């Protein structure tokens, strides 16, 4: 296992991320017959099974089978890179950002951090759930983008609301 340069905690790919990657691949390449698994699913499933069998919660990315790591990286690339919501209190002197929950060092060194260290940070801030990205500014952190039709419907609804409120006033 590698170590995060910003803490004493070992960094490895958490079993929850392996499970998320498995679910990603299940949706991306579903079994044609309910039995056969795509190669990325088989590779990730083996890693997951070994973690469970050995009662471990992390796998060392450096010793992980290549195909499993490649499948995990495809999933990783589909996730948001940074937890930033563009409200950074570390620039005001805070040790931990109120907006995203990252430490000053994590904010400063984010571009150089490995994908595994980034996911470990994501896991920590998600488990803490205390930053503004999980509360008052959750809409800024929304990962889903509106479709053109949803945007048009929302705009039409807002216009109708404004028209109604002007009639009442």
Image: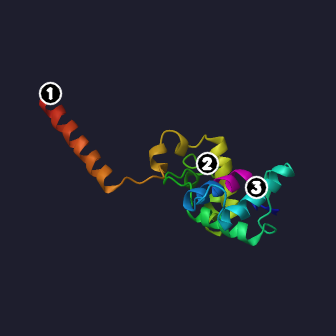
Q: How many marks?
A: 3
Helix, strand or loop status at disc 2 = loop
Residue at 58% in and 43% down: 131
The single residue placed furthest to the front in the displayed view is 33
> Percent position (x, y) of residue 162?
20, 38
Colour style of the rendered protein structure? rainbow
Crowding near the residue tagged with mark 1, few <14, some 14–19, many ≥20 C-alpha atoms within 10 Å: few
Residue under label 2: 101
Q: CA distance from mark 3 to mark 1?
A: 60 Å
Residue 1 in magenta stretch: no
Q: Is 12 a magenta residue?
A: yes
Pinpoint residue 149: horizontal percent, then vertical percent. Answer: 29, 53
Residue 165 screen position, x and y as percent: 18, 32
Q: In this rendering, which labeled residue sits more in front, label 3 or label 1?
A: 3
Distance (Cα) linking label 3 and label 2: 28 Å
Work out whether residue 68 or residue 81 is closer to the camera in this orientation and state it.
68
Q: Residue at x 58, y 60 (%)?
A: 32
What residue is rendered at 79% in x and 69% in y?
A: 62
For residue 48, the mark is 3
Furthest-bottom residue in view? 66
| Marks 1/2: CA–CA distance | 43 Å
The stretch of residues the image draws in magenta is: 8-20
Question: Measured along the vertical axis of the image, is residue 127 above or below residue 21?
Answer: above
Q: Is residue 6 left or right of residue 109?
A: right
Residue at far left of view: 167
Q: Which residue is mark 1?
A: 168
Q: Secondary structure at mark 3?
A: helix
Q: From this viewpoint, is residue 26 visible?
A: yes
């Amino acid at each position: 296992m590698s170590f995060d340069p910003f803490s004493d905690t070992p960094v490895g790919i958490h079993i929850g991320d392996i499970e998320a990657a498995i679910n990603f691949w299940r949706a991306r390449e579903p079994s044609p017959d309910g039995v056969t698994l795509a190669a990325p699913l088989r590779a990730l499933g083996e890693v997951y099974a070994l973690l469970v069998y050995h009662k471990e919660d992390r796998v060392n990315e450096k010793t992980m089978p290549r195909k499993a790591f490649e499948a995990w990286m495809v999933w990783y690339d589909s996730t948001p890179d940074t937890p930033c919501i563009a409200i950074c209190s570390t620039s005001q002197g805070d040790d931990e950002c109120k907006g995203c929950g990252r430490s000053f060092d994590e904010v400063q060194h984010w571009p150089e951090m490995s994908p595994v260290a980034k996911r470990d940070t994501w896991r920590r801030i998600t488990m803490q759930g205390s930053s503004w990205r999980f509360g008052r500014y959750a809409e800024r952190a929304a990962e889903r983008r509106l479709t053109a039709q949803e945007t048009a419907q929302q705009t039409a609804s807002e216009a109708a609301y404004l028209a109604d409120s002007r009639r009442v006033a």
